[in-house]
């Protein structure tokens, strides 16, 4: 029973991070998703390329092959390029489909099985936890860049500044 609760919770948490990214991307133009701050920080496009590559590599044939696939070229995920908003969204959705489908197909009995990521053995539960740390790290970057790019036109994804009391009042009803 606890295993099912954990898997459902992991899917719910991951879905909430996808939603944050979806709602950020929806507010931006393709050009904005290619913008990079001064220095060498990643654009939203590069973050999406990286997350998609990571999710597809880790979660394709999750229980039966190493999570670092031979076809993945991680370094290229951080190389600048040009992509349309539609292509970026497709990359984003492709990665999410693989991870959500893979975790959705797991059973509680799978949680104690051992998988490999870069030849490192991990139990499935730990591999999921690892992803639950990696994904929000990068989704937070996407949201932060989105807020910078939109400035005062940013549509809050949670409780807007100054709106805590009104939110709390609604929750107490």
Image (tube, rainbow, N blue to C red):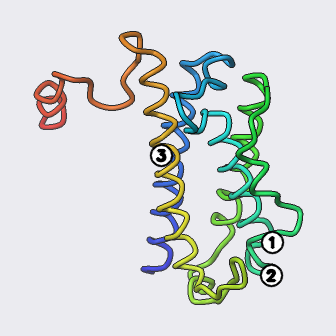
Residue 19 picture location, percent across and down: 52, 38
Q: Which mark is residue 12?
A: none
Name the one closer to the observer, 64 or 144.
Answer: 144
Pointer 2 or 3: first along the chain:
3
Asked if 106 appears above or below 144 in the picture, the reply is below
Give coordinates of residue 14: x percent, y percent.
Answer: 52, 53
Disc 2 crowd rating (10 Å Cα; few below 14, some 14-19, many 20+) is few
**Quadrant containing the C terminus in the rendered view:** top left
Q: Which residue is mark 2?
A: 64
Q: Label 1, label 2: how many angstroms apart (C-alpha)?
A: 5 Å
Q: Position of residue 133 (x, y in %)?
A: 47, 62
Work out how far the residue at label 2 is from the one at label 3, CA to CA, in angstroms: 27 Å
x and y percentages locating residue 2 in the rendered image: 42, 79
On screen, residue 123 versus residue 66, left or right, reads: left
Q: Residue at x 52, y 47 (%)?
A: 138
Mark 2 residue element: loop
Quarter of the rendering containing residue 49: top right
Nearest the camera: 58 or 34? 34
Q: Within 10 Å of the Cα at label 3, are there few (<14), some (14-19), or many (20+) other Cα atoms?
A: few
Asked which quadrant contains residue 105, the reply is bottom right
Query: What is the count of numbered marks?
Result: 3
Kindly identify which numbered label has been placed on residue 16.
3
Are circles 2 and 3 on residues that touch, CB within 8 Å?
A: no
The label shown at residue 61 is: 1
Where 57 sits versus 46, above or below? below
**Is 72 rendered above or below residue 160?**
below
In this view, the residue farthest toward the front is: 39
Residue lying at the far top in this picture: please name it: 153
Tell me whether the residue at label 1 lies in contact with that at label 2, contact meaning CB atoms closer than 8 angstroms. yes
Image quadrant where one finds the N terminus: bottom left
Q: Residue furthest right?
A: 71
């Amino acid at each position: 029973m606890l295993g099912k609760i954990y898997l459902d919770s992991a899917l719910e948490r991951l879905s909430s991070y996808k939603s944050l990214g979806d709602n950020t991307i929806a507010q931006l133009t393709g050009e904005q998703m290619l913008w990079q701050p001064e220095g060498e920080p990643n654009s939203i496009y590069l973050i999406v390329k990286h997350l998609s590559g990571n999710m597809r590599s880790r979660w394709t044939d999750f229980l039966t092959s190493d999570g670092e696939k031979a076809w993945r070229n991680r370094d290229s995920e951080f190389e600048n390029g040009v992509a349309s908003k539609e292509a970026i969204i497709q990359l984003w959705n492709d990665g999410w489909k693989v991870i959500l489908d893979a975790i959705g197909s797991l059973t509680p009995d799978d949680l104690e099985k051992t998988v490999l990521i870069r030849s490192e053995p991990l139990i499935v539960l730990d591999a999921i936890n690892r992803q639950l740390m990696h994904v929000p790290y990068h989704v937070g970057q996407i949201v932060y860049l989105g807020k910078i790019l939109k400035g005062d036109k940013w549509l809050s994804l949670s409780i807007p500044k100054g709106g805590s009391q009104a939110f709390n009042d609604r929750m107490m009803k």
